Amino acid sequence: MSFPVTALLLLLPHEARGLRVGTSPSNSRRCCDARAESEQPVRLWNSGVCPFAQRVWIALLELETPFTHQIIDLADKPSEFLRLSELASGSKDKSTVPLLETGTGEVVSESLDIVRLLGRAARSKGPGSRAKGDCFG
């Protein structure tokens, strides 16, 4: 399998930081933090190939937000994902990635809405995070 050079350039800095990134369906990976999965305040549901979900994934990595990366097979969506998708969209018919669960119980499904939410959260962390947060929303 070959990857475009730009994709490798995006992944290499994060791989160098020791982040574990999964590509197979139904795998969950912790990113940005060594805390146990149960302590991760944010969970990203992703197919691994969706460019909109990759936008959110990159924002999470760049903002150094601790999260769990749940990679799913879109042909065989887990029931938990379907339940959360219904909460986010208000419809049983829409179950797309990305889907983000926050530590406060909020579920967001549109990539731009998620990135803006992450940007606002980063800005509220203080001056050091404000500049990065401004880049994302």
Image (cartoon, helix red, strand yellow):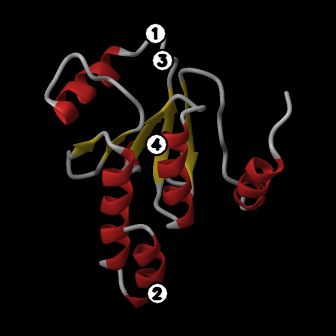
> Residue at (46%, 73%) from the top-left corner?
135
Front in this rendered view, residue 11 or 22: 11
Q: Is residue 125 above or below residue 51?
A: below
From the viewer's perspective, tell me whether residue 91 is left or right of residue 77. left
Front: mark 3 or 4: 3
Circles 1 and 3, Cβ within 8 Å, touching? The answer is yes
Q: Nearer the N terminus, badge 2 or badge 1?
A: 1
Q: Which residue is mark 4?
A: 37
Q: Amino acid at mark 3?
A: Leu
Q: Amino acid at mark 2?
A: Gly
Residue 119 x %, y % = 37, 68
Q: Residues within 10 Å of mark 1 (few under 14, many from 20)?
A: few
User: Which dot marks residue 124?
Assistant: none
From where the camera sits, is residue 120 visible?
A: yes
How far apart are the alpha carbons under marks 2 and 1?
Answer: 41 Å
Circles 2 and 1, Cβ within 8 Å, touching? The answer is no
Q: Nearer the N terminus, badge 3 or badge 2?
A: 3
How far apart are the alpha carbons under marks 3 and 4?
Answer: 22 Å
Q: Residues within 10 Å of mark 3 (few under 14, many from 20)?
A: some
Front: mark 4 or 2: 2
Q: Which residue is mark 1?
A: 76
Residue 136 x %, y % = 43, 67
Q: Quadrant of the C terminus?
A: bottom left
Q: Secondary structure at mark 4?
A: helix
Q: Residue furthest left?
A: 90
How far apart are the alpha carbons under marks 1 and 3?
Answer: 5 Å
Q: Quadrant of the N terminus?
A: top right
Residue 37 x %, y % = 46, 42
How far apart are the alpha carbons under marks 4 and 1?
Answer: 23 Å
Q: Nearer the N terminus, badge 3 or badge 4?
A: 4
